[in-house]
Amino acid sequence: MEERNYWLGFSVFSGVGPLKFKKLLAEFGTAEKAWKAEITDLKKVLGDKLTIKFDKFRNEFSIKDYLEKLKKKNAWFITSNDTSYPELLLEIPNPPFVLFGRGLRFEKFKDELKQTIGIVGSRKPTNYGKEVTQKFAEDLSLSGFTIVSGLALGIDGISHLSTLENGGKTIAVLGCGVDCCTPIHNKNIYDKIINGRGCVISEVPLSYLPGKGLFPSRNRIIAGLSKAVLVTEGAEDSGSLITADFAFKFNRKVFAVPGPINSVLSKGPYKLINKGAKLVTSTEDILNELKLQIPNYKSQINPKTQTTKYKTESKEERLILQALRNEELYFDEIARKTRIDSSKLGSILSMMEIKGIVKNVGNSTYSVKE
């Protein structure tokens, strides 16, 4: 039996994580030797209780049967010793020694794994948050980024879906087994990912249901897989901030989108900005920070609408552009001329700025972007 299959066996045993597995390899040299080791020798690494538990597990568990189970579920696994394992993920402390997946295998898009960005945020985004996320996911995927997220409700699902709709690749990191889809409301996105240009992955074995302790671990993988992490919207205690904190620890760039100051879901991004995240209002800001070439978005055509990407669609946007047609205007002047409620106007202007339609020239004064 191949050495990597013994790695698989240890990954299914709940008592051995990356750190303990590393100690086993250091003690025995290979996973096969560790798997077949005498109880007295295993106790040196695992201790008495865990060794007894493992000995029972290995006597009852069939690696061969588990390989067959993976095959039946169209699932695969990869070890941190395999050449197609993501290089970025190898850089973090104690990366998963086995990852399970469904959909595209990593070797099918190895180059794209070097150009990744995580997009995370609130499970209950505002309309502003939805638009912002859709726009960034679209532009970043068109710029050649593979979008990484967690398939949760809200921002995560929007990130995956927008990427797929624009022909990009996406990776969903789950807090459960890859043969499960939670939340079930995102089953359509899950199916589109595994049947299209992406994959779902997890470090937990098949059929594991989500548990509270699994989500921080999931967030660590999202940050580890990503060259940078973008938070588009989230409360001050949002789980997306955990992902951003991991990104800070891993020396990855963290980007945050500002939102209306009267929204509770703007507090998360502003908190990150205070911690050192880069405030961004456009994909160009991200590309500049990462020192990457900026595409000419305005020359790109959206294949679904056959219109330029920056075409204005709402009545409010047209009113604002009409007001700014010949001059720069202060926020209050725009509100007066357009008769748009100021609380709503802030969100619309922020979205127009992200779309590249208008720009804030300073002191809440806006003009049309050339």
Image: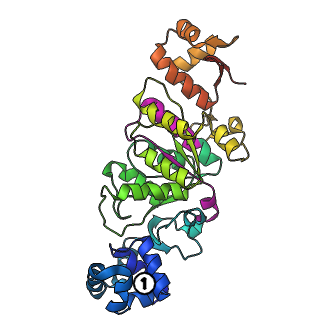
Front-most of residues 2 and 277:
277
Q: Is residue 348 left or right of residue 202?
A: right
> In the rendered image, which quarter is residue 24 located in?
bottom left
Specify whether residue 212 is in view. yes
Left or right of 328 in this view: 199: left
User: How far from the left and from the top, in percent, is residue 8?
Assistant: 42, 78
| The quarter of the displayed image where residue 52 is located | bottom left
Q: Could you say where residue 365 lies in the image, as x and y percent from the top left?
A: 63, 16
Q: Amino acid at mark 1?
A: Tyr
**Residue at the location (34% across, 85% down)?**
43
User: Looking at the picture, does residue 232 appear above or below residue 6?
Assistant: above
Q: Helix, strand, or loop for circle 1?
A: helix
**Circle 1 Cα neighbour tier, 10 Å, few/some/many (<14 / 14–19 / ≥20):** some
Compared to 75, does 311 lie above or below?
above
Judge whether residue 197 can be spotted in this image.
Answer: no
Q: Is residue 155 above or below residue 340?
A: below
Does 131 lie within the magenta span?
yes
Residue 203: x %, y % from top left: 42, 66
What quarter of the picture does the C terminus occupy?
top right
Question: Badge 1 is on which residue?
Answer: 6
Q: Which quarter of the rendered picture does the N terminus lie within?
A: bottom left
Pick the residue in front: 314 or 181: 181
In x, y percent, where is residue 337? 56, 6
Magenta part of the protein: which range?
A: 109-138
Tally of marks:
1
Residue in the image at 46% along x and 31% along y: 266
- On whether residue 33 falls in the magenta region, the answer is no
